[in-house]
Image (cartoon, rainbow, N blue to C red):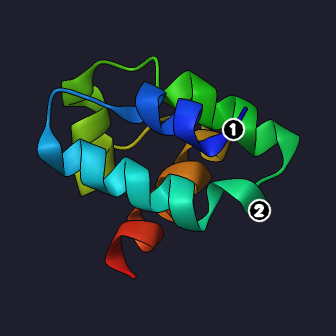
Amino acid sequence: MDAARLKWQCRRGMLELDLMLEAFVDKVWPTLSAAEHATFDTLLDYPDQLLFDYLLGNGVPTDGEMMRVIEKIRQAAAD
């Protein structure tokens, strides 16, 4: 999937999420494995509030692979 289409899928109802996800797509997404791409695609299906909680550390997913992708998103947003 090209970056422009992926960025469109990352558009959410919260500016904070948009900024974090866009930074991740720009900086990290091209370097991910196929499994990480699939995990990120699953993450995009989460409701905004749950995603927001995970990205801000107010919640922790039970899936370890999901947590690793979330950590990468946080890092990309912090850089």
Residues 65 and 27: in front is 27
Assign a secondary structure to mark 1: loop
Type of amino acid under label 1: Asp
Residue 24 location (% of width, % of height)? 49, 58
Residue at 54 percent of width and 53 percent of height: 25
Type of amino acid under label 2: Thr
Identify residue for label 1.
2
62 with respect to 38 (left or right): left
Residue at 77 percent of width and 62 percent of height: 31
Residues 5 and 15: in front is 5
9 with respect to 38 (left or right): left
Q: Quadrant of the C terminus?
A: bottom left
- Point out which mark residue 31 bears: 2
Residue at 33 percent of width and 55 percent of height: 20
State which tag comes first along the sequence, 1 or 2: 1
Q: Is residue 42 visible?
A: yes
Assign a secondary structure to mark 2: helix
Q: Tell me the quarter of the picture where residue 49 sits.
A: top left
- Point out which mark residue 46 bears: none
36 with respect to 56 (left or right): right
Residue at 47 percent of width and 39 percent of height: 7
Q: Is residue 58 visible?
A: no
Residue ranking furthest to the front: 4
